[in-house]
Amino acid sequence: MRRLHLRVILFAAIALSVGRGAAHADVLYTYGYTPRGIGMGGAMTAVADDMGAAYYNPAGAAFQTKPLIGLGYLYTGSEMKGIGVRAPSLATTYGVLFGTILPIPFGGFLTDRVAFGLASFFPNGLLLGIEVPYATSPQYVLLQNSGRSLSFIPTFSIKLLDILSIGGGVQTFDNTSGSWHARINQDGSIQATVTQEMIGSYAATAGLMFRPGAYWSEVDGLRFGFVFRDSFFTSYKIPVATSVGGVPLVVEFNATSLYTPRQYVAGLSYATGNWLFAVDGSYNEWSEFPHPSLDVSVHFKIPVLPIAFRDSVAEAPHFHDTVTVKTGAEVTAWRGNDGVFMTRFGLGYDPSPVPPQRGNTNFLDTDRWIGGVSVGWRWLGVGTYKFSAPLVFDLGGQLQYLPARVTEKADTVDPTNPGYPRVGFQGWLYAVGGTLSIPFDYE
């Protein structure tokens, strides 16, 4: 019987070693998509007329009557400092951006009214990377896996009226499932078969764009936008099955990762002369956030012996909904025969949905103050030689300040908890990116 106990312990240790893996909020939510949008603080809902339309507002693509294609690169990093705890490192993110708007050449009423849009982010070196630390481990619950998953957003849009368009599509991302089947031999050795699958998951996105200036010249330059993005997440589920002395033993690991909340975003922009001003407000349903820790359930019953295994106990995170505000501006700083030079800047505030960590969990999070800058160069040609289509270069950067947030633990918390007697952190996030896009509308 002692040998049986040792085998069970060994099996559980191996199972736990393969069960560690993942959490939350994707790179597009955290930083934005194009360098233009990053530089404008993310205030793009009522603008959305470039390669980022499929993400920022799919309805904006319907106002484009000529094809547009863009390719770029995004890099993010951080500087974190723990307060009362040792701050874990936060992985850098870098990957390829690809976006396009392709008008569909229907005739009749649909002439110049329907468009296909696409926005995508391909992280370097992996399609999906997830990590699920123990619940008591200090962790960046909303940041530790941002940018570690492929994002692919195809959309369609239609211009119903000269002043109104609608659009919609899905955000496609990776999901994972698998199993671990093992057999414990009489000599104590273990034979195992592991299967793992990458499957696609989908979340709806929809948008509306209203440009009243087409009917009323008094408000020419004014735009309104609205976007809905459904929540999405990656599931991590691995059942581990074997038998010990003929008794079935199943240990199942479950976790939720890369969670992004359901969003309702409203935006307004106004263009006058060489200036474009924009503001966005977003309601984020973080209260639906599932607990991010690993669930472990054990199904094993030893005949005769009164031994019972207890499943893991998940603590509700009690996140709350938030309202994010972003503002941005773009100015045409110089205009000449060879091109147009633009500068942009933006500010934003994204409050943390994470409550004070007075209990056993140590979720490190705080408000984010966002600042961005960007430059753009629309190159038309050299001297008398003009390109058949302009080349648009954009370069942008964003810096996010995470002010210090410290929480004193409750007296009921075990002193061996890694966050006892207080837990907190402060730091910076940053992102830089560049794109080359070609709008085929040169005249």
Image (cartoon, rainbow, N blue to C red):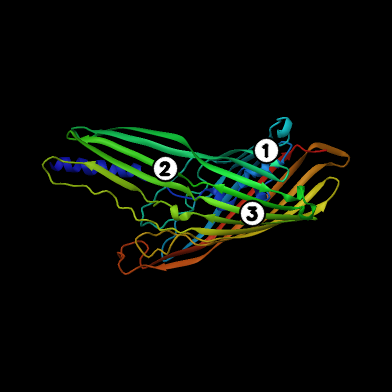
Cα separation, mark 1 vs mark 3, equals 21 Å
Q: CA distance from mark 3 to mark 2?
A: 32 Å
Nearest-to-viewer mark from 3 and 2:
3
Amino acid type at circle 3 is Gly
Q: Which residue carries the number 2 mark? A: 235
Q: Mark 3 or 2 closer to N-term?
A: 2
In screen coordinates, is 339 left or right of 288? right
Q: Secondary structure at mark 2?
A: strand
Neighbours of disc 1 within 10 Å: few (<14), some (14-19), many (20+)? many
Q: Name the spot of residue 105 as percent of width and height, x first.
A: 71, 30
What residue is shown with label 3? Answer: 267
Residue extending furthest right? 384
Q: Residue at x 27, y 36 (%)?
A: 241
Q: Earlier in the sequence, mark 1 or mark 3?
A: 1
Mark 2: amino acid: Ser
Q: Is residue 81 visible?
A: yes
Circle 1 is placed at which residue position? Answer: 101
